[in-house]
């Protein structure tokens, strides 16, 4: 059944909250196992845990406040000249006014592949970047749909959401690693044969958690990323009132065989379409992709009522 864009935005917000809830449950389970291994409230244990927690927070804050400059530098993007790229600036300006957002900085990537991304910690520190392929191979309506999608990421605070998700992944992985290390340390220091079986079981549990936690945490993060893409598509229609503009752009992107040379695993989730197209099976591809299948996004756009 077709959904209007307000309903689709609402549904994707709910799913994002549920996925974050799964994150917190995972971290809660790991914290509980950690407390069992430490044998209760241990001052040294809490000091060790707090030290690494502070390091994670500092790293996250540095990444958060410098994400726009880091991403543009890594991607080889440069500031777009307003005189040379008049149409692009006009589209960004008119959609910024329509969305009530301040005008973001506009960058370009000298690459013939069709793609774009947005970054920045909030609307006042935002960047929109498009490839030369977007400018050369998309119509004005299609380019407008792409820009509206990226502006929607800014308006919906998706960069902030994904930064939080990344921090949660780091915390989960750190906890699982600490559980394994504390278990191995405790087993080596324990000489009581009565407790040897207990420690053997704990080692097995710790190894399983250490192996599965990074995988589970990253799957949750990728699921959050995919939901935010659907939400940005729906929000873009709210701005343009033209679902076919973005749908047609996505169709061209899906047919584009040009690889995006500047893309890497660290920044792939930012782009409007996954620039690291893989050849895995459909099930694995959907599980480990930063984006939902383009076919699903196109169908969802065509089903939106406005």
Image (cartoon, rainbow, N blue to C red):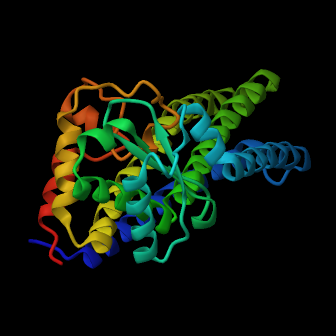
User: In which quadrant of the rendered image does the N terminus lie?
Assistant: bottom left
Q: Using the image, determine if residue 170 lies above or below residue 122.
A: above
- What residue is rendered at 35% in x and 41% in y? 115
- What residue is rendered at 52% in x and 39% in y? 213
* Residue 87 lies in quadrant: bottom left
- What residue is rendered at 54% in x and 60% in y? 104
Q: Position of residue 12 (x, y in %)?
A: 34, 66
Viewer-proximal residue among 265 and 109: 109
User: In which quadrant of the rendered image does the C terminus lie?
Assistant: bottom left
Viewer-proximal residue among 303 and 109: 109
* Residue 160 lies in quadrant: bottom right
Viewer-proximal residue among 213 and 152: 152
* Res 219 visible: no
Q: Using the image, determine if residue 179 lies above or below residue 34.
A: above
Q: Position of 210 compared to 225: left or right?
A: right
Q: Using the image, determine if residue 51 lies above or below residue 281.
A: below
* Residue 44 lies in quadrant: top right
Q: Position of residue 211 (x, y in %)?
A: 52, 30
Viewer-proximal residue among 40 and 181: 181
Name the residue furthest left. Answer: 1
Q: Position of residue 36 (x, y in %)?
A: 70, 47
Q: Using the image, determine if residue 131 lies above or below residue 119.
A: above
Name the residue furthest front. Answer: 83
Q: Position of 64 compared to 164: left or right?
A: right
Q: Position of residue 215 (x, y in %)?
A: 46, 36
């Amino acid at each position: 059944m077709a959904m209007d864009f307000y309903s689709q935005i609402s549904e994707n917000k709910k799913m994002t909250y549920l996925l974050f809830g799964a994150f917190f449950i995972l971290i809660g389970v790991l914290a509980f196992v950690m407390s069992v291994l430490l044998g209760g409230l241990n001052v040294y244990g809490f000091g060790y845990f707090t030290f690494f927690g502070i390091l994670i927070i500092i790293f996250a804050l540095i990444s958060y406040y410098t994400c726009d400059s880091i991403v543009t530098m890594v991607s080889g993007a440069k500031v777009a000249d307003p005189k040379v790229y008049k149409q692009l600036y006009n589209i960004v300006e008119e959609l910024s006014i329509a969305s009530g957002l301040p005008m973001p900085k506009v960058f370009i990537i000298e690459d013939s592949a069709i793609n774009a991304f947005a970054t920045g910690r909030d609307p006042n520190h935002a960047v929109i970047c498009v490839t030369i392929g977007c400018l050369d191979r998309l119509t004005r309506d299609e380019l407008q749909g792409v820009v509206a999608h990226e502006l929607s990421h800014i308006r919906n605070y998706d960069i902030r959401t994904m930064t939080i998700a990344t921090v949660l992944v780091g915390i989960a992985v750190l906890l699982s690693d600490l559980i394994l290390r504390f278990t191995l340390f405790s087993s080596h220091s324990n000489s009581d044969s009565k407790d040897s079986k207990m420690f053997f079981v704990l080692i097995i549990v710790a190894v399983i958690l250490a192996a599965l936690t990074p995988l589970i945490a990253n799957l949750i993060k990728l699921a959050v990323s995919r939901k935010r893409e659907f939400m940005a598509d729906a929000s873009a229609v709210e701005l343009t009132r033209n679902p076919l503009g973005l749908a047609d752009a996505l169709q061209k992107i899906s047919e584009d065989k040009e690889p995006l040379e500047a893309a890497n695993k660290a920044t792939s989730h930012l782009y409007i379409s996954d620039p690291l197209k893989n050849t895995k099976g459909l099930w694995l591809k959907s599980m480990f992709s930063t984006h939902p299948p383009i076919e699903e996004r196109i169908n969802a756009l065509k089903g939106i009522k406005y």
